């Protein structure tokens, strides 16, 4: 199952966070639309669904922005820093 289909199923078909830039692109407007707690909750819900693993999620996210939306390939450059922010936040709770 493609990562956006999983997000649709878990977060709701009309979720504005379908592409997950709110989780993986700290430089985007989407990132600023949710709190760190909301981001951690969304990621946790997607992963706890057991419909996708984090490595597969990240692989498909990268593919989406590097191949399907090649004009937005720069988006993937923020993944590691964004995950670091989320992890630091989650560990301080």
Image: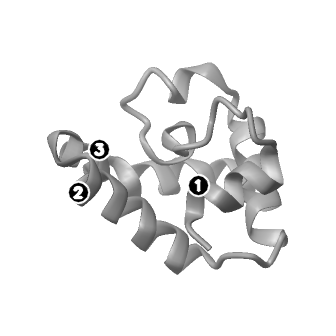
Picture residue at 26% right of the left edge, 46% below the top: 69
Question: Residue 56 location, x and y as percent?
Answer: 52, 78
Q: Are marks 3 and 2 in contact (CB under 8 Å)?
A: no
Q: Is residue 92 visible?
A: no
The residue singled out by tag 2 in the image is: 66
- Can you tell which quarter of the image residue 14 is in? top right
The residue singled out by tag 1 in the image is: 4
In this rendering, position of residue 65 left or right of residue 19: left
Question: Residue 4 location, x and y as percent?
Answer: 59, 55
Helix, strand or loop at disc 1? helix
Question: Residue 70 location, x and y as percent?
Answer: 17, 48
Q: Is residue 63 visible?
A: yes
Picture residue at 81% right of the left edge, 42% below the top: 12
Give the label on residue 60, or none.
none
Q: Earlier in the sequence, mark 2 or mark 1?
A: 1
- Can you tell which quarter of the image residue 34 is in? top right
């Amino acid at each position: 199952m493609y990562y956006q289909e999983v997000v649709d199923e878990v977060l709701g078909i009309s979720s504005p966070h379908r592409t997950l830039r709110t989780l993986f692109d700290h430089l985007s407007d989407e990132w600023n639309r949710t709190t760190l707690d909301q981001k951690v909750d969304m990621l946790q819900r997607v992963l706890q669904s057991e419909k996708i693993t984090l490595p597969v999620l990240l692989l498909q996210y990268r593919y989406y922005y590097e191949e399907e939306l090649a004009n937005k390939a720069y988006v993937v450059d923020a993944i590691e820093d964004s995950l670091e922010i989320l992890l630091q936040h989650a560990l301080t709770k």
